[in-house]
Amino acid sequence: MNQSQKLSVVEKIGYSLGDLAANLVFQTLVTWISYYYLNIFGLKSEHASLLTLIVGLVAAFAFNPIMGAIADRTKTKWGKFRPWILWTAIPLGVVSLLAFKTPNFSYNGKVIYAVITYALLLLLYAANNLPYSALSGVITGDMKERNSIGAYRFVAVMFAQFFVQVFMYNFIIKAGGGTDTDSMKVGISKVMTVLAIIGTLMLIICFLTTKERVIPKQEQKSTLAEDLKDLSKNKPWLIMLVVTTLVFITLAMKGGSYVYYFENYVDKAELTSFLLPFKKFLPTFENDTSLGLGVFNGGGILVGLIGIMLSQWFANKYGKRNVFMGSLFISTLFIIFFYFTSPKSIAVIFTAQILHGFFYGISTPILWTMIADVADFSEWKNNRRATAIIFSAMMVGLKAGLSIGSSLVSFILGKYHYVANSKTGQTAEAIKGTKMLISIYPAITFLIAVALLFFYEINKKMEVQIEADLKQRRTN
């Protein structure tokens, strides 16, 4: 490995576009899948919950490990992982569009259609994003460069998140011409068409601008059984698998609940009064609920970008584990704080979201770069590199967390007797449920993740040792 491990700005930006594209899909699933199936597509809460849970868990524990094994054994002139970004670009865009179309079928027909399109979407997302994520482990062996591309990558993620969480609700209303169910069906279909085209083009650019530099030894050969045996003994991998699952349960649960929180809990008169200054700068929002949701999410995302930009400095100085654990814990405190806010305390609600966004932003890129470190740890311990199957921990955790979190939104709303598109308003119990879904319930999984990180052994000292030892081995 005698080539430079330094990356150009063009390559870092090109790589980040892959996650921008993928997150136009992923952030839509996190934020809108429960709302879409319940309020637009028309599924019952128990069916929406089972659909997202069962299909999602099958995708997590079947699609991802298989895809990791296949990607590690892919051999082309473009490398192991880059080709998958190209091969899946168009199919992922097409299925993203189909998954958010509402066909004129019977109820049972719609359930079957939803199962098929959701499964295909998760399959193609795995075939695209797992190799993309693994690419970060072989695009460079330099830890500081790896931290740098992590920061670039998650600035792109935050842009995707910003669009989906700030503007998408309003764009759906505009594109469909109203807030009734039929209008929302038309609106979300039009918006997803545009996102699918943009995402496909970005994935192609990502493929064209990146390069794989960390090449496994030519004589390295390992069976899938050997790779799995290595994983079973890899304690940091096991911990990151569980931590990733817990983190994405929280993200899916609270992200998918904000629209219910603004529609049913936040006081409309106080929100209107609070939003008056914003209407001068954002006059195109259709109503105060969409504007309030947009400003709420946007504030958290924008300060999250500041956290992301500071993340690399903190990680280089104090080590990834310590910074990840500390920032995740502090961000959780502000999630819990939502439980104690009243519907009329609009300024307090928005401030809590901004502070949560800042501290969670610090943790965002570190989670992914820690997985690349786990791949190095595995090579360091076993003298064999299996990058993609290591990264399957992230994808298994991501899919499992998304599935469980989205399923919990529908399930918990059902338990609190939420009625989709109710003409008479929600009961006090249902309104309490929307409050719990963005406060106490998501805080539990974050706190468990923080506790698990105490047992993660790759600290700052070990990071330096692993990097130096692997650099020496590869040079030799």
Image (cartoon, rainbow, N blue to C red):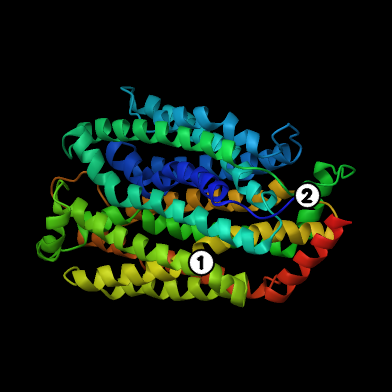
Q: Name the residue that disc number 1 marks.
A: 363
Q: Name the residue that disc number 2 marks.
A: 228
The span from disc 1 to disc 2 (Cα, nearest Å) is 28 Å
Q: Which residue is rendered at x = 58% and y = 74% of the image?
A: 451
Foreground residue among 243 and 195? 195
Asked if residue 31 lies left or right of residue 77, the reply is left
State whether residue 426 appears in this view.
no
Circle 1 or circle 2, nearest the eye:
1
**Relative to residue 113, is residue 415 depicted above or below?**
below
Q: Amino acid at mark 1?
A: Ser
Q: Which residue is rendered at x = 17% and y = 53% of the image?
A: 282
State whether residue 36 appears in this view.
yes
Q: Position of residue 205 (x, y in %)?
A: 52, 36
Foreground residue among 120 and 314? 314
- Label 1's element? helix
Q: Residues within 10 Å of mark 2 (few under 14, many from 20)?
A: some
Q: Which residue is rendered at x = 50% and y = 46% of the image?
A: 19
**Relative to residue 9, is residue 174 depicted above or below?**
above
Foreground residue among 472 and 9? 9
Q: Position of residue 367 (x, y in %)?
A: 57, 61
Q: Position of residue 368 (x, y in %)?
A: 58, 57
- Label 2's element? helix
Q: Which residue is rendered at x = 46% and y = 41% of the image?
A: 21
Asked if residue 455 lies left or right of residue 103, the reply is right
